[in-house]
Image (cartoon, helix red, strand yellow):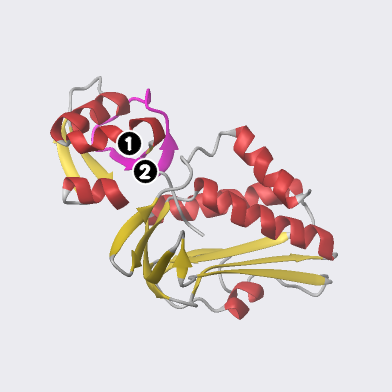
Amino acid sequence: MPPPTAITELVLDPNRVVDAVSGDGDGAVVTFLGLVRDHNQGRRVTHLIYEAYDALALKALDRIVTEAAEHWPSVRLAIHHRTGRLEIGEASVVIAAASAHRADAFAASRYAIERIKQIVPIWKHEYFEGGDTWIEGATADPDNEEARAHARKLACP
Amino acid sequence: MPVTIRLFARLREVAGTGELTRELPADATVAGLWDQMVRDYPAMAAYQPSLSCAVNAEYARFKSPIADGDEIAFLPPVSGG
């Protein structure tokens, strides 16, 4: 069985992430794919290079899985995040959330992507027509309860 | 005592390397090490308000003490997903 969390330079296989969580008791598996798009803030993006602090990024993904289990005990979650050079249309992250019922699986998958953007030490280096730039989002602080509550609110509007 | 410093993304580019070693006093903290980094690389100062840090691949606070052989990482704002 594939691991529930992974940081990898290999092309992501959504089926493998689903295989990490699904079981006979599940009535729903929600998958989320984060893709590299061809534009950002008016720029024509050519590709991205993702850099990670691998050891801490894996622990941060594990932490998100644990947090989601606290909020939605019936859900099993898997998150695989890619690093290195990604072309337009490729998946940078795949999330799978399995549950007996769909509502919790949808909520947990949304929570996971919001938390990834908050606390996982991964950085996008965007290459676009005419230049390149580092994308800098959230100041990572896993103990920031306000950020965690925000992610939960987005998951359960 | 010797320590290893890990730098990522823009901070790595500012330093020109993702890994440094430094000799620190026994009572060193992450904050003190960061001050030293800013002295060595003034362009890093802009990251002070938005910086995270880790010690031995666990998120840490700037007041955290540093021990012999630790790996300290300085993390600019993250952008995964």
Magenta residues? B54-75
* Secondary structure category for the residue under label 2: loop
Q: Quadrant of residue B67?
A: top left
Q: Residue at left 46%, top 72%?
A: A38
Q: Quadrant of residue B42?
A: top left
The answer to whether residue A35 is seen in the rendering is yes
The number of numbered discs placed on residues in the rendered structure image is 2
Please indicate whether residue A58 sits to the left or right of residue A134 in the image: right
Q: Position of residue B59 (x, y in %)?
A: 44, 38
**If you read the primary sequence from the N terminus, does the residue marked by circle 1 or circle 2 appear first?**
1
| Residue that label 1 marks | B47
Residue A155 sits above or below residue A81 on the image: above
Task: Determine whether label 1 and label 2 are within 8 Å by CB.
Answer: yes
Q: Chain of mark 2?
A: B
Residue A54 sits above or below residue B53 on the image: below
Q: Position of residue A65 (x, y in %)?
A: 63, 54
Tag 1: residue type?
Tyr
Q: Quadrant of residue A109?
A: bottom right
Q: Residue at left 60%, top 38%?
A: A147
| Residue that label 2 marks | B76
Q: Chain of mark 1?
A: B
Q: Position of residue A121 (x, y in %)?
A: 43, 50
